[in-house]
Amino acid sequence: MMKKAFIAIILLALRTAACAEECVGDLTYAVFPYLPDAAYYRELIENRWAELEPGIKLVRAEWDCYDHEAPEGIDVIMYDAVERDRLIANGWIQPISPNAAWDHEDIFPFAFEGFTVENDLYGIPVFLCGNFLIYDRQYEALSTAEHMTDLADEIGILVVNSENPQNRRQYVIETVADERGEANPSVDGSAEACLPLIDRLAVDAHKQDEDDQVVMAYDSGVGRGYIGFSESMRFLRNRADQTSIKAISFSSGDNIPRVYADAAAVTANARGQRYEKCLKLINVMAEASVMTALSVQEGEPQYLLLARRSPYQPLANQFPLYTLLEQIASDEENHVILTP
């Protein structure tokens, strides 16, 4: 009897030790903090996760990939591809198999390429965004323009916060890319000529507006268009029905289709069963059903540019502008913006 009891104790101890290493009681995760509504995204993730893994609690964390701080104590993060090489070099994220992504054929191939280094995938692409021309399609000069320079004779037609230093740098990089035909060019200041042009196109009273103020001004009837991310269109009410969106060259050269991309990734510390659960979580964060739900809030379209195909058609059935967003996102010439 004592021998059997002793064996039972040993087996229980071994199971307890194994569980201490393998059992996962919670996962800590951080979403991209610059989403229009990160709280709603978290809610959708957690509701879906509760259906799949009710025994594992999700713990929210805050982390910003641009702050250059390690994601200490966080199992899953989201980051912008411009920070990809730095995160890999610092050993903060680990690769996954491309086949580990659910419905991976549904994700645009160029998005996968943006997070792939030597056949290793560093996260599942979720969101895209970029600098697009959003405009009143009744204004022929903007409807027919393919290059920013096509508008050189126009004055005060765009509501643009053109004096924002971050925006100005982005416009210069866009111009250099289009002039040189390089997706991720190094910048040497040779494209400064684009800034006087954008300043001439800008409505003077709004050159220092915040992004939301730019959209609100346009919606109130100011100007004929603006430069912005697709999700800015969620603020449109008065001019939504007459507004369109397209990519445009920032120079006289051909437009190089370029988009920013954000991915959900597993941090370096996850191992064993925790790693497997992290894989499941990043798939939930990128799942088509979650993306579709996130794209409509309280009946209003959010106009997010998504990295997978399937949500676009059902969204376009409700909100026709999603047809144009699909055209932008599905361009086979697209390149993910990386740090050159």
Image: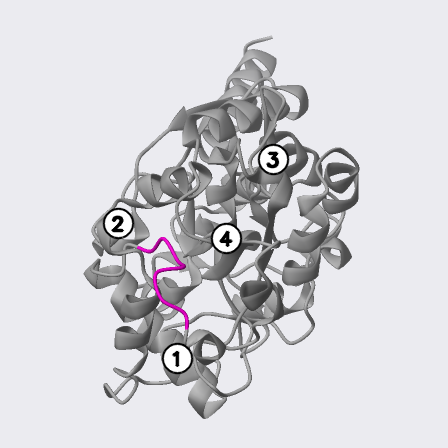
Q: Which residue is mark 1?
A: 175
Earlier-in-chain disc, 3 versus 4: 4
Q: How is the image coloured?
A: one colour
The reply to whether residue 130 is in sight is: no
Disc 4 marks which amino acid?
A: Ala
Mark 3–mark 4 distance (CA, rounded to whole Å): 17 Å
Labelled disc at residue 263: 4
The residue sitting at 67% across, 35% down in the picture is: 292
The secondary structure type at the circle numbered 2 is helix
Q: Secondary structure at mark 4?
A: strand
Most prominent secondary structure in the magenta stretch? loop
- x and y percentages locating residue 224 in the rendered image: 47, 54
Contact, mark 2 vs mark 3 (Cβ under 8 Å): no
| Residue at 69%, 63% in the rendered image | 330
**Label 3 residue SS:** loop
Q: Quadrant of the C terminus?
A: bottom left
Look at the numbered disc 1 and give the secondary structure of its residue.
helix
Q: Nearer the viewer, mark 3 or mark 4?
A: 3
Asked if the residue at tag 4 contacts the one at tag 3, i.e. Cβ–Cβ closer than 8 Å, the answer is: no
Mark closer to the chain start, 1 or 3 = 1
x and y percentages locating residue 264 in the rendered image: 50, 48
Q: Which mark is residue 295?
A: 3
Q: Which quadrant holds the N terminus?
A: top right
Residue 290 shown in magenta = no
Within-10-Å neighbours for mark 3: few <14, some 14–19, many 20+: many
Residue behind mark 2:
206
Q: Amino acid at mark 2?
A: His
Please state if 24 lies on the left or on the right of 334 as rendered.
Answer: left
Q: Mark 2: give few (<14), some (14-19) or many (20+) Cα within 10 Å.
A: some
Single out the mark in the foreground, 1 or 4: 1
Give the magenta range. 154-160
